[in-house]
């Protein structure tokens, strides 16, 4: 999160705040991914993956920092996956029919 400080003597149009729609929560609570890209994040010891609505999941692979594959997931759910991993940094690779995305996660 970034902060901005200003005073009444500043130029009035020196900042522009732009909002864009990243995702929308539907009535059933599933986020719709309208960004067109795969998102990967962890919350505590749970892995969350968000794929574009027009994509189909092929698999999710988790690697340790030595490059050794330690886990493969080939079917949903892709949100709230409980990670029973030792505290460390891991690489998560998500593959859909049209994209591949890798991201680092840290388990504490």
Image (cartoon, rainbow, N blue to C red):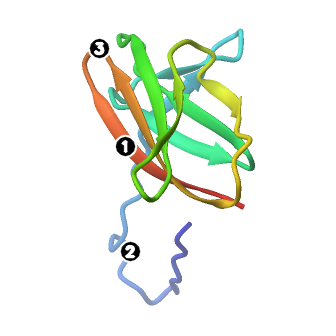
Of circles 3 and 2, the one toward us is 3
Of circles 1 and 2, the one toward us is 1
**Residue 56, quarter of picture:** top left
Badge 1 marks a residue whose secondary structure is strand
**Residue 97, quarter of picture:** top left
Q: Which residue is mark 1?
A: 102
Q: Which residue is mark 3?
A: 97
Instruction: Work out whether 63 lies above or below 32.
Output: below
Label 1 – label 3 distance at C-alpha: 15 Å
For marks 1 and 2, the one nearer the N-term is 2
Badge 3 marks a residue whose secondary structure is loop
Task: Tell me which residue sits at (35%, 10%) in the image.
Answer: 54
**Front position in the image: 1 or 41:** 41
Q: Quadrant of the N terminus?
A: bottom right
Q: Which residue is mark 2?
A: 12
Label 3 – label 2 distance at C-alpha: 47 Å
Task: Tell me which residue sits at (63%, 17%) in the image.
Answer: 77
Badge 2 marks a residue whose secondary structure is loop
Instruction: Work out whether 76 lies above or below 79.
Output: above
For marks 1 and 3, the one nearer the N-term is 3
Task: Tell me which residue sits at (68%, 30%) in the image.
Answer: 81
Q: Quadrant of the C terminus?
A: bottom right
For marks 3 and 2, the one nearer the N-term is 2
């Amino acid at each position: 999160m970034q902060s901005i400080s200003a005073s009444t003597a500043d130029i009035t149009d020196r900042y522009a705040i732009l909002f864009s729609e990243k995702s929308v929560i539907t009535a059933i609570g599933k986020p719709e991914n309208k960004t067109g890209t795969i998102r990967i994040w962890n919350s505590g010891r749970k892995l969350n993956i968000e794929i574009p609505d027009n994509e189909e999941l092929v698999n999710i692979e988790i690697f340790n920092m030595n490059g050794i594959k330690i886990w493969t997931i080939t079917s949903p759910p892709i949100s709230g996956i409980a990670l029973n991993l030792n505290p460390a940094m891991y690489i998560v690779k998500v593959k859909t029919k049209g994209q591949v995305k890798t991201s680092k996660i840290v388990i504490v």
